[in-house]
Image (tube, helix red, strand yellow):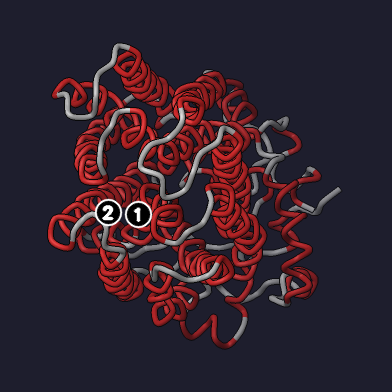
Amino acid sequence: MATDPIAANPAMPVHPTRPVRWYNLIAYGSNDVLGAGSMAVISTWILIFYTSFCGLSAAQATIIFGVARVLDAFTSPIIGHLSDSIGRSAIGRRFGRRRVFILAAIPLLPSFAIMWVAGQSFWYYLVTYVLFEMVYAMEIIPYETLASEMATDYRTKAKFAGARILCGQLSAIAAAFLPGWLIARLGPDSPDTYLYMGIIFSVMFMGAAGLLYAFSWERQRPPGLDDEEAARDRPTLGAAFKALYRNLFSTLGIRAFRLHLGMYLGGYISQDIYNAAFTYFVIFALAGTTGIVANLVGVTYIVQLIAVVLAINFALRLSPAAAYRFAALSFGIGVIVFLAMYAAGYTATSALFWLPVVFAGLGRGALNYIPWATYNYMADVDEIVTGRRREGAFAGVMTFVRKMSQALAIILVGQVMQASGFVSKATVQSPTAIAAIVIVLGAGTLAMLVFGVLVSTRFRLTPATHAILLDEIERFRAGERTPSDRAHAEVVEDLSGWRYDQLWGRNPVAR
Protein backbone atom coordinates (compact mmCIF):
# COMPACT_ATOMS: atom_id res chain seq x y z
CA MET A 1 0.00 0.00 0.00
CA ALA A 2 1.28 3.48 -0.82
CA THR A 3 2.32 5.68 2.06
CA ASP A 4 0.38 8.75 3.08
CA PRO A 5 1.75 11.65 1.00
CA ILE A 6 1.60 14.04 3.98
CA ALA A 7 3.80 11.74 6.01
CA ALA A 8 6.15 10.92 3.14
CA ASN A 9 6.33 14.48 1.87
CA PRO A 10 5.48 17.23 4.35
CA ALA A 11 6.32 19.91 1.79
CA MET A 12 3.32 19.51 -0.48
CA PRO A 13 2.83 21.98 -3.36
CA VAL A 14 1.12 25.14 -2.23
CA HIS A 15 -1.54 27.24 -3.92
CA PRO A 16 -0.42 30.28 -5.89
CA THR A 17 -1.01 33.70 -4.39
CA ARG A 18 -0.50 35.87 -7.47
CA PRO A 19 -3.70 37.42 -8.83
CA VAL A 20 -4.71 36.59 -12.40
CA ARG A 21 -5.02 39.80 -14.44
CA TRP A 22 -6.67 40.38 -17.80
CA TYR A 23 -3.29 40.43 -19.57
CA ASN A 24 -2.41 37.03 -18.09
CA LEU A 25 -5.59 35.64 -19.62
CA ILE A 26 -4.82 37.23 -22.99
CA ALA A 27 -1.21 36.00 -22.98
CA TYR A 28 -2.31 32.50 -22.04
CA GLY A 29 -5.10 32.47 -24.62
CA SER A 30 -2.90 33.86 -27.40
CA ASN A 31 -0.73 30.75 -27.36
CA ASP A 32 -3.61 28.78 -28.84
CA VAL A 33 -2.69 30.54 -32.08
CA LEU A 34 -0.15 27.73 -32.14
CA GLY A 35 -2.46 25.09 -30.66
CA ALA A 36 -5.69 25.63 -32.57
CA GLY A 37 -4.27 27.80 -35.36
CA SER A 38 -1.69 25.33 -36.61
CA MET A 39 -4.12 22.43 -36.35
CA ALA A 40 -6.79 24.41 -38.24
CA VAL A 41 -4.35 25.14 -41.05
CA ILE A 42 -3.12 21.54 -41.19
CA SER A 43 -6.50 19.86 -40.92
CA THR A 44 -8.05 22.09 -43.62
CA TRP A 45 -5.21 22.43 -46.12
CA ILE A 46 -2.40 19.90 -45.68
CA LEU A 47 -4.03 16.99 -47.52
CA ILE A 48 -5.17 19.12 -50.45
CA PHE A 49 -1.67 20.71 -50.59
CA TYR A 50 0.05 17.32 -50.63
CA THR A 51 -2.26 15.80 -53.24
CA SER A 52 -2.62 18.88 -55.50
CA PHE A 53 0.85 20.51 -55.43
CA CYS A 54 3.29 17.87 -54.21
CA GLY A 55 2.32 14.87 -56.34
CA LEU A 56 1.56 12.63 -53.37
CA SER A 57 -1.26 10.12 -53.38
CA ALA A 58 -4.02 10.32 -50.76
CA ALA A 59 -2.50 7.28 -49.04
CA GLN A 60 0.99 8.83 -48.95
CA ALA A 61 -0.37 12.12 -47.63
CA THR A 62 -2.25 10.49 -44.79
CA ILE A 63 0.68 8.19 -43.98
CA ILE A 64 2.82 11.30 -43.40
CA PHE A 65 0.15 12.71 -41.14
CA GLY A 66 -0.28 9.41 -39.31
CA VAL A 67 3.43 8.66 -38.80
CA ALA A 68 4.03 12.14 -37.38
CA ARG A 69 1.06 11.78 -35.03
CA VAL A 70 2.19 8.37 -33.79
CA LEU A 71 5.74 9.59 -33.09
CA ASP A 72 4.37 12.66 -31.37
CA ALA A 73 2.03 10.49 -29.32
CA PHE A 74 5.08 8.88 -27.71
CA THR A 75 7.00 12.15 -27.41
CA SER A 76 4.22 14.05 -25.63
CA PRO A 77 4.00 11.92 -22.45
CA ILE A 78 7.79 12.02 -22.17
CA ILE A 79 7.74 15.82 -22.35
CA GLY A 80 4.92 15.83 -19.79
CA HIS A 81 6.99 13.69 -17.42
CA LEU A 82 10.09 15.84 -17.90
CA SER A 83 8.11 19.02 -17.24
CA ASP A 84 6.82 17.51 -13.99
CA SER A 85 10.28 16.66 -12.73
CA ILE A 86 12.82 19.02 -14.34
CA GLY A 87 11.97 21.71 -11.77
CA ARG A 88 14.55 20.18 -9.43
CA SER A 89 17.36 20.85 -11.91
CA ALA A 90 19.27 24.11 -12.14
CA ILE A 91 17.71 25.05 -15.48
CA GLY A 92 14.25 24.24 -14.18
CA ARG A 93 14.73 26.42 -11.09
CA ARG A 94 16.03 29.26 -13.27
CA PHE A 95 13.40 29.27 -16.04
CA GLY A 96 10.56 27.16 -14.62
CA ARG A 97 9.86 23.49 -15.11
CA ARG A 98 7.10 24.22 -17.67
CA ARG A 99 8.22 27.55 -19.11
CA VAL A 100 11.74 26.42 -19.98
CA PHE A 101 10.27 24.25 -22.75
CA ILE A 102 8.23 27.16 -24.09
CA LEU A 103 11.31 29.39 -24.18
CA ALA A 104 13.38 26.74 -25.96
CA ALA A 105 10.67 26.15 -28.59
CA ILE A 106 10.41 29.78 -29.75
CA PRO A 107 13.39 29.76 -32.20
CA LEU A 108 12.27 26.39 -33.58
CA LEU A 109 8.70 27.40 -34.50
CA PRO A 110 9.60 28.52 -38.08
CA SER A 111 9.76 24.77 -38.79
CA PHE A 112 6.06 25.23 -39.63
CA ALA A 113 6.93 27.29 -42.72
CA ILE A 114 9.28 24.76 -44.32
CA MET A 115 6.45 22.20 -44.45
CA TRP A 116 4.79 24.21 -47.22
CA VAL A 117 7.50 24.15 -49.93
CA ALA A 118 5.98 22.56 -53.04
CA GLY A 119 7.60 20.08 -55.40
CA GLN A 120 9.66 18.10 -52.88
CA SER A 121 9.86 14.37 -52.22
CA PHE A 122 7.76 12.19 -49.94
CA TRP A 123 10.65 11.98 -47.47
CA TYR A 124 11.03 15.77 -47.34
CA TYR A 125 7.41 16.17 -46.34
CA LEU A 126 7.61 13.35 -43.83
CA VAL A 127 10.71 14.77 -42.11
CA THR A 128 9.47 18.38 -42.05
CA TYR A 129 6.06 17.38 -40.72
CA VAL A 130 7.58 15.20 -37.99
CA LEU A 131 9.96 18.03 -37.07
CA PHE A 132 7.11 20.49 -36.59
CA GLU A 133 5.13 17.95 -34.57
CA MET A 134 8.08 17.52 -32.19
CA VAL A 135 8.46 21.29 -31.74
CA TYR A 136 4.69 21.62 -31.31
CA ALA A 137 4.67 19.01 -28.54
CA MET A 138 7.67 20.63 -26.87
CA GLU A 139 5.74 23.88 -26.53
CA ILE A 140 2.11 22.82 -26.20
CA ILE A 141 2.43 20.13 -23.51
CA PRO A 142 3.91 22.47 -20.86
CA TYR A 143 1.43 25.14 -21.98
CA GLU A 144 -1.49 22.85 -21.23
CA THR A 145 -0.40 22.61 -17.58
CA LEU A 146 -0.15 26.34 -16.92
CA ALA A 147 -3.84 27.00 -16.19
CA SER A 148 -3.65 24.56 -13.28
CA GLU A 149 -0.34 26.09 -12.21
CA MET A 150 -1.68 29.66 -12.20
CA ALA A 151 -5.16 29.08 -10.76
CA THR A 152 -7.01 26.77 -8.37
CA ASP A 153 -10.67 27.81 -8.34
CA TYR A 154 -13.29 26.62 -10.85
CA ARG A 155 -14.19 30.02 -12.30
CA THR A 156 -10.62 31.20 -12.93
CA LYS A 157 -9.70 27.92 -14.61
CA ALA A 158 -12.81 28.24 -16.76
CA LYS A 159 -11.71 31.76 -17.73
CA PHE A 160 -8.30 30.44 -18.78
CA ALA A 161 -9.96 27.76 -20.89
CA GLY A 162 -12.29 30.36 -22.38
CA ALA A 163 -9.42 32.72 -23.22
CA ARG A 164 -7.57 29.86 -24.86
CA ILE A 165 -10.44 28.72 -27.01
CA LEU A 166 -11.51 32.26 -27.97
CA CYS A 167 -8.01 33.11 -29.17
CA GLY A 168 -7.78 29.72 -30.84
CA GLN A 169 -10.99 30.37 -32.75
CA LEU A 170 -9.69 33.75 -33.91
CA SER A 171 -6.55 32.06 -35.23
CA ALA A 172 -8.69 29.39 -36.89
CA ILE A 173 -10.66 32.14 -38.65
CA ALA A 174 -7.35 33.48 -39.97
CA ALA A 175 -6.37 29.95 -41.00
CA ALA A 176 -9.49 29.79 -43.15
CA PHE A 177 -9.61 33.28 -44.66
CA LEU A 178 -5.88 33.91 -45.13
CA PRO A 179 -5.49 31.22 -47.81
CA GLY A 180 -8.58 32.58 -49.55
CA TRP A 181 -7.07 36.07 -49.56
CA LEU A 182 -3.76 34.73 -50.88
CA ILE A 183 -5.54 32.64 -53.53
CA ALA A 184 -7.33 35.75 -54.78
CA ARG A 185 -3.97 37.48 -55.33
CA LEU A 186 -1.71 34.63 -56.39
CA GLY A 187 -4.24 32.50 -58.25
CA PRO A 188 -5.73 29.11 -57.33
CA ASP A 189 -2.87 27.20 -58.97
CA SER A 190 0.01 28.86 -57.10
CA PRO A 191 1.70 26.72 -54.43
CA ASP A 192 3.26 29.92 -52.99
CA THR A 193 -0.12 30.55 -51.36
CA TYR A 194 0.65 27.88 -48.79
CA LEU A 195 4.29 28.88 -48.27
CA TYR A 196 3.36 32.49 -47.51
CA MET A 197 0.66 31.26 -45.18
CA GLY A 198 3.23 29.11 -43.35
CA ILE A 199 5.62 32.04 -42.96
CA ILE A 200 2.90 34.35 -41.61
CA PHE A 201 1.71 31.78 -39.09
CA SER A 202 5.27 30.99 -37.98
CA VAL A 203 5.77 34.64 -37.02
CA MET A 204 2.45 34.59 -35.15
CA PHE A 205 3.46 31.41 -33.28
CA MET A 206 6.73 32.96 -32.10
CA GLY A 207 5.02 36.14 -30.91
CA ALA A 208 2.35 34.21 -29.01
CA ALA A 209 4.89 31.94 -27.30
CA GLY A 210 6.91 34.98 -26.27
CA LEU A 211 3.84 36.60 -24.69
CA LEU A 212 3.03 33.38 -22.86
CA TYR A 213 6.51 33.14 -21.39
CA ALA A 214 6.51 36.80 -20.33
CA PHE A 215 3.10 36.82 -18.59
CA SER A 216 2.79 33.36 -17.02
CA TRP A 217 4.10 31.74 -13.86
CA GLU A 218 4.18 28.40 -12.10
CA ARG A 219 2.93 27.18 -8.76
CA GLN A 220 5.64 27.43 -6.11
CA ARG A 221 7.11 24.11 -5.00
CA PRO A 222 8.95 24.45 -1.69
CA PRO A 223 12.02 22.25 -1.13
CA GLY A 224 11.83 19.20 1.06
CA LEU A 225 10.88 16.29 -1.18
CA ASP A 226 12.15 13.07 0.27
CA ASP A 227 15.06 11.29 -1.39
CA GLU A 228 12.95 8.40 -2.64
CA GLU A 229 10.53 10.62 -4.56
CA ALA A 230 13.34 12.79 -5.92
CA ALA A 231 15.16 9.70 -7.21
CA ARG A 232 11.98 8.36 -8.78
CA ASP A 233 11.26 11.62 -10.60
CA ARG A 234 14.82 12.45 -11.71
CA PRO A 235 14.41 13.79 -15.28
CA THR A 236 16.38 11.20 -17.22
CA LEU A 237 15.34 9.79 -20.59
CA GLY A 238 15.01 6.30 -19.15
CA ALA A 239 12.76 7.58 -16.38
CA ALA A 240 10.70 9.42 -18.98
CA PHE A 241 10.07 6.24 -20.99
CA LYS A 242 9.07 4.40 -17.84
CA ALA A 243 6.78 7.30 -16.95
CA LEU A 244 5.03 6.98 -20.32
CA TYR A 245 3.61 3.62 -19.33
CA ARG A 246 3.23 4.34 -15.62
CA ASN A 247 1.36 7.59 -16.25
CA LEU A 248 -0.80 6.10 -18.98
CA PHE A 249 -2.18 3.43 -16.67
CA SER A 250 -2.21 5.48 -13.47
CA THR A 251 -4.09 8.47 -14.93
CA LEU A 252 -6.65 6.10 -16.44
CA GLY A 253 -7.25 4.94 -12.88
CA ILE A 254 -9.10 8.24 -12.31
CA ARG A 255 -12.75 7.80 -13.30
CA ALA A 256 -13.39 11.46 -14.17
CA PHE A 257 -10.34 11.47 -16.44
CA ARG A 258 -11.48 8.33 -18.28
CA LEU A 259 -14.86 9.92 -18.96
CA HIS A 260 -13.23 13.21 -19.87
CA LEU A 261 -11.05 11.41 -22.44
CA GLY A 262 -14.12 9.78 -23.96
CA MET A 263 -15.85 13.14 -24.38
CA TYR A 264 -12.67 14.73 -25.69
CA LEU A 265 -12.06 12.02 -28.26
CA GLY A 266 -15.70 11.96 -29.36
CA GLY A 267 -15.75 15.71 -29.93
CA TYR A 268 -12.32 16.06 -31.50
CA ILE A 269 -12.07 12.93 -33.64
CA SER A 270 -15.48 13.73 -35.13
CA GLN A 271 -13.96 17.05 -36.18
CA ASP A 272 -10.77 15.37 -37.45
CA ILE A 273 -12.81 13.18 -39.77
CA TYR A 274 -15.01 16.09 -40.82
CA ASN A 275 -12.00 18.36 -41.49
CA ALA A 276 -10.12 15.70 -43.46
CA ALA A 277 -13.08 15.02 -45.74
CA PHE A 278 -14.74 18.46 -45.92
CA THR A 279 -12.38 20.10 -48.42
CA TYR A 280 -12.72 17.13 -50.77
CA PHE A 281 -16.49 17.04 -50.15
CA VAL A 282 -16.93 20.68 -51.22
CA ILE A 283 -14.58 20.47 -54.23
CA PHE A 284 -15.60 17.12 -55.69
CA ALA A 285 -19.07 16.30 -54.32
CA LEU A 286 -20.43 19.85 -54.45
CA ALA A 287 -18.46 21.15 -57.48
CA GLY A 288 -16.83 23.89 -55.40
CA THR A 289 -13.38 25.53 -55.36
CA THR A 290 -10.63 26.12 -52.81
CA GLY A 291 -11.87 29.70 -52.52
CA ILE A 292 -15.36 28.47 -51.58
CA VAL A 293 -13.80 26.07 -49.07
CA ALA A 294 -11.90 28.99 -47.47
CA ASN A 295 -15.11 31.02 -47.17
CA LEU A 296 -17.20 28.16 -45.77
CA VAL A 297 -14.52 27.18 -43.26
CA GLY A 298 -13.96 30.81 -42.30
CA VAL A 299 -17.65 31.38 -41.57
CA THR A 300 -17.69 28.11 -39.61
CA TYR A 301 -14.91 29.40 -37.37
CA ILE A 302 -16.67 32.74 -36.90
CA VAL A 303 -19.76 30.88 -35.71
CA GLN A 304 -17.53 28.71 -33.50
CA LEU A 305 -16.24 31.88 -31.84
CA ILE A 306 -19.80 32.84 -30.91
CA ALA A 307 -20.44 29.29 -29.71
CA VAL A 308 -17.45 29.43 -27.37
CA VAL A 309 -18.85 32.53 -25.66
CA LEU A 310 -22.17 30.76 -25.17
CA ALA A 311 -20.49 27.57 -23.96
CA ILE A 312 -18.38 29.42 -21.38
CA ASN A 313 -21.51 30.77 -19.71
CA PHE A 314 -23.37 27.47 -20.02
CA ALA A 315 -20.55 25.40 -18.54
CA LEU A 316 -19.94 27.89 -15.71
CA ARG A 317 -23.57 28.05 -14.63
CA LEU A 318 -24.85 24.57 -15.34
CA SER A 319 -23.13 21.37 -16.44
CA PRO A 320 -20.27 20.82 -18.92
CA ALA A 321 -21.79 17.44 -19.82
CA ALA A 322 -25.18 18.97 -20.68
CA ALA A 323 -23.48 21.68 -22.76
CA TYR A 324 -21.51 18.95 -24.54
CA ARG A 325 -24.69 17.11 -25.54
CA PHE A 326 -26.30 20.26 -26.95
CA ALA A 327 -23.09 20.95 -28.91
CA ALA A 328 -22.94 17.43 -30.34
CA LEU A 329 -26.58 17.67 -31.40
CA SER A 330 -25.95 20.97 -33.23
CA PHE A 331 -22.86 19.64 -35.02
CA GLY A 332 -24.72 16.47 -35.97
CA ILE A 333 -27.63 18.47 -37.43
CA GLY A 334 -25.16 20.45 -39.55
CA VAL A 335 -23.60 17.28 -40.96
CA ILE A 336 -27.02 15.72 -41.69
CA VAL A 337 -28.18 18.87 -43.49
CA PHE A 338 -25.00 18.86 -45.61
CA LEU A 339 -25.66 15.28 -46.62
CA ALA A 340 -29.33 15.96 -47.36
CA MET A 341 -28.48 18.93 -49.58
CA TYR A 342 -25.90 16.85 -51.45
CA ALA A 343 -28.47 14.11 -51.98
CA ALA A 344 -30.92 16.72 -53.28
CA GLY A 345 -28.41 17.90 -55.91
CA TYR A 346 -27.39 21.27 -54.46
CA THR A 347 -23.92 22.65 -55.30
CA ALA A 348 -21.50 24.65 -53.16
CA THR A 349 -22.67 27.92 -54.76
CA SER A 350 -26.11 27.61 -53.16
CA ALA A 351 -26.88 30.20 -50.47
CA LEU A 352 -28.60 27.47 -48.46
CA PHE A 353 -25.21 26.01 -47.56
CA TRP A 354 -24.79 28.68 -44.90
CA LEU A 355 -27.50 26.91 -42.85
CA PRO A 356 -25.51 23.72 -42.10
CA VAL A 357 -22.40 25.87 -41.65
CA VAL A 358 -24.11 27.69 -38.78
CA PHE A 359 -25.30 24.47 -37.10
CA ALA A 360 -21.90 22.82 -37.50
CA GLY A 361 -20.04 25.90 -36.27
CA LEU A 362 -22.18 26.28 -33.15
CA GLY A 363 -21.59 22.65 -32.23
CA ARG A 364 -17.88 22.58 -33.04
CA GLY A 365 -17.11 25.72 -31.06
CA ALA A 366 -18.67 24.32 -27.89
CA LEU A 367 -17.07 20.90 -28.45
CA ASN A 368 -13.68 22.61 -28.68
CA TYR A 369 -14.16 24.52 -25.42
CA ILE A 370 -15.85 22.04 -23.09
CA PRO A 371 -13.16 19.31 -22.96
CA TRP A 372 -10.42 21.86 -22.29
CA ALA A 373 -12.51 23.52 -19.60
CA THR A 374 -13.03 20.20 -17.80
CA TYR A 375 -9.40 19.16 -18.35
CA ASN A 376 -8.21 21.94 -16.06
CA TYR A 377 -9.89 20.18 -13.12
CA MET A 378 -8.46 16.70 -13.71
CA ALA A 379 -5.35 17.38 -11.62
CA ASP A 380 -7.64 18.26 -8.70
CA VAL A 381 -9.42 14.90 -8.94
CA ASP A 382 -6.04 13.19 -9.21
CA GLU A 383 -4.74 15.06 -6.17
CA ILE A 384 -7.43 13.67 -3.89
CA VAL A 385 -6.57 10.16 -5.15
CA THR A 386 -2.76 10.39 -5.03
CA GLY A 387 -2.00 13.38 -2.79
CA ARG A 388 0.22 14.79 -5.54
CA ARG A 389 0.01 17.34 -8.37
CA ARG A 390 0.66 15.73 -11.79
CA GLU A 391 -0.49 18.27 -14.36
CA GLY A 392 2.30 17.31 -16.76
CA ALA A 393 1.42 13.62 -16.61
CA PHE A 394 -2.20 14.34 -17.52
CA ALA A 395 -1.21 16.71 -20.34
CA GLY A 396 1.15 14.10 -21.78
CA VAL A 397 -1.26 11.18 -21.53
CA MET A 398 -4.14 13.23 -22.90
CA THR A 399 -2.07 14.22 -25.92
CA PHE A 400 -0.78 10.66 -26.35
CA VAL A 401 -4.30 9.24 -26.57
CA ARG A 402 -5.46 12.13 -28.73
CA LYS A 403 -2.60 11.91 -31.21
CA MET A 404 -2.80 8.12 -31.54
CA SER A 405 -6.53 8.21 -32.20
CA GLN A 406 -6.20 11.19 -34.53
CA ALA A 407 -3.50 9.41 -36.52
CA LEU A 408 -5.68 6.35 -36.93
CA ALA A 409 -8.68 8.47 -37.96
CA ILE A 410 -6.78 10.43 -40.61
CA ILE A 411 -4.99 7.36 -41.97
CA LEU A 412 -8.35 5.60 -42.24
CA VAL A 413 -9.81 8.53 -44.21
CA GLY A 414 -6.87 8.49 -46.63
CA GLN A 415 -6.91 4.75 -47.09
CA VAL A 416 -10.66 4.70 -47.76
CA MET A 417 -10.25 7.44 -50.37
CA GLN A 418 -7.33 5.63 -51.98
CA ALA A 419 -9.21 2.33 -52.06
CA SER A 420 -12.21 4.03 -53.67
CA GLY A 421 -10.10 5.17 -56.64
CA PHE A 422 -9.27 8.76 -55.66
CA VAL A 423 -6.76 10.26 -58.16
CA SER A 424 -4.32 12.98 -57.04
CA LYS A 425 -4.28 16.23 -59.08
CA ALA A 426 -7.45 15.21 -60.93
CA THR A 427 -10.10 17.91 -61.28
CA VAL A 428 -12.93 15.35 -61.39
CA GLN A 429 -13.23 12.15 -59.35
CA SER A 430 -15.14 8.96 -60.06
CA PRO A 431 -18.63 8.39 -58.56
CA THR A 432 -17.11 5.70 -56.30
CA ALA A 433 -14.49 8.08 -54.92
CA ILE A 434 -17.10 10.79 -54.33
CA ALA A 435 -19.38 8.31 -52.57
CA ALA A 436 -16.49 7.33 -50.28
CA ILE A 437 -15.86 10.98 -49.39
CA VAL A 438 -19.55 11.49 -48.56
CA ILE A 439 -19.72 8.33 -46.42
CA VAL A 440 -16.58 9.24 -44.50
CA LEU A 441 -17.86 12.76 -43.82
CA GLY A 442 -21.28 11.56 -42.70
CA ALA A 443 -20.93 8.17 -41.02
CA GLY A 444 -17.50 8.80 -39.51
CA THR A 445 -18.40 12.16 -37.98
CA LEU A 446 -21.79 11.09 -36.63
CA ALA A 447 -20.50 7.84 -35.13
CA MET A 448 -17.88 9.67 -33.03
CA LEU A 449 -20.46 12.25 -31.90
CA VAL A 450 -22.77 9.50 -30.67
CA PHE A 451 -19.87 7.92 -28.76
CA GLY A 452 -19.04 11.21 -27.03
CA VAL A 453 -22.67 11.83 -26.06
CA LEU A 454 -23.00 8.38 -24.50
CA VAL A 455 -19.90 8.98 -22.39
CA SER A 456 -21.11 12.45 -21.31
CA THR A 457 -24.20 10.96 -19.63
CA ARG A 458 -21.90 9.56 -16.90
CA PHE A 459 -19.72 12.67 -16.39
CA ARG A 460 -20.77 14.62 -13.28
CA LEU A 461 -18.11 17.27 -12.73
CA THR A 462 -19.89 20.61 -12.23
CA PRO A 463 -19.11 23.85 -10.36
CA ALA A 464 -20.92 22.44 -7.32
CA THR A 465 -19.15 19.06 -7.29
CA HIS A 466 -15.78 20.72 -7.93
CA ALA A 467 -16.28 22.94 -4.88
CA ILE A 468 -17.00 19.84 -2.79
CA LEU A 469 -13.87 18.19 -4.19
CA LEU A 470 -11.68 21.14 -3.15
CA ASP A 471 -13.22 21.16 0.35
CA GLU A 472 -12.37 17.49 0.80
CA ILE A 473 -8.81 18.04 -0.49
CA GLU A 474 -8.33 20.72 2.18
CA ARG A 475 -9.61 18.30 4.82
CA PHE A 476 -7.03 15.73 3.73
CA ARG A 477 -4.27 18.36 3.82
CA ALA A 478 -5.34 19.22 7.36
CA GLY A 479 -4.96 15.60 8.41
CA GLU A 480 -8.63 14.56 8.33
CA ARG A 481 -9.34 11.09 6.99
CA THR A 482 -13.15 11.04 7.17
CA PRO A 483 -15.61 12.99 4.98
CA SER A 484 -17.53 15.99 6.28
CA ASP A 485 -20.75 14.15 5.38
CA ARG A 486 -21.90 11.18 3.32
CA ALA A 487 -23.08 13.32 0.40
CA HIS A 488 -19.58 14.78 0.00
CA ALA A 489 -18.08 11.31 0.14
CA GLU A 490 -20.38 10.12 -2.63
CA VAL A 491 -19.42 13.05 -4.85
CA VAL A 492 -15.70 12.44 -4.38
CA GLU A 493 -16.08 8.70 -4.90
CA ASP A 494 -18.03 9.25 -8.12
CA LEU A 495 -15.39 11.63 -9.52
CA SER A 496 -12.39 9.59 -8.44
CA GLY A 497 -13.71 6.06 -8.89
CA TRP A 498 -12.27 5.04 -5.48
CA ARG A 499 -13.76 4.52 -2.02
CA TYR A 500 -13.16 7.35 0.42
CA ASP A 501 -10.91 5.24 2.62
CA GLN A 502 -8.68 4.55 -0.42
CA LEU A 503 -8.05 8.21 -1.24
CA TRP A 504 -4.99 10.40 -0.56
CA GLY A 505 -2.40 7.86 -1.58
CA ARG A 506 -3.94 4.67 -0.21
CA ASN A 507 -4.48 3.07 -3.63
CA PRO A 508 -2.46 1.60 -6.52
CA VAL A 509 -2.73 4.83 -8.57
CA ALA A 510 -0.42 6.65 -6.15
CA ARG A 511 2.42 4.14 -6.43
Of the numbered discs in the image, which one, if any, rests on residue 499? none
User: Residues at badges 1 and 2 in contact (C-beta under 8 Å)?
Assistant: yes
Answer whether residue 200 is visible to the viewer in this image: yes
Residue type, numbered disc 2: Ala
Q: Residues within 10 Å of mark 1 (few under 14, many from 20)?
A: many
Taking 219 as reference, is 427 left or right? left
Taking 362 as reference, is 439 left or right? right
- Location of mark 2 (residue): 175
x and y, in percent, of residue 180 in the image: 19, 52
- Which residue is situated farthest in the right direction here? 1
In the image, is residue 434 above or below residue 379? above
- Location of mark 1 (residue): 41
First-in-chain label (1 vs 2): 1
The residue sitting at 46% across, 81% down in the picture is: 104
Identify the secondary structure beneath mark 2: helix
x and y, in percent, of residue 396 in the image: 60, 56
Q: Residues within 10 Å of mark 2 (few under 14, many from 20)?
A: many
x and y, in percent, of residue 467 in the image: 44, 35
x and y, in percent, of residue 74 in the image: 67, 60
In the image, is residue 419 above or below residue 343? below
The image quadrant that residue 391 belongs to is bottom right
The image quadrant that residue 355 belongs to is top left
The residue sitting at 76% across, 37% down in the picture is: 502
Taking 352 as reference, is 329 left or right? right
Residue type, numbered disc 1: Val
Answer whether residue 461 is visible to the viewer in this image: no
The residue sitting at 52% across, 18% down in the picture is: 457
Taking 71 as reference, is 311 left or right? left
The residue sitting at 71% across, 50% down in the picture is: 248
Identify the secondary structure beneath mark 1: helix
Q: CA distance from mark 1 to mark 2?
A: 5 Å
Residue in the foreground of this view, choosing between 300 and 232: 300
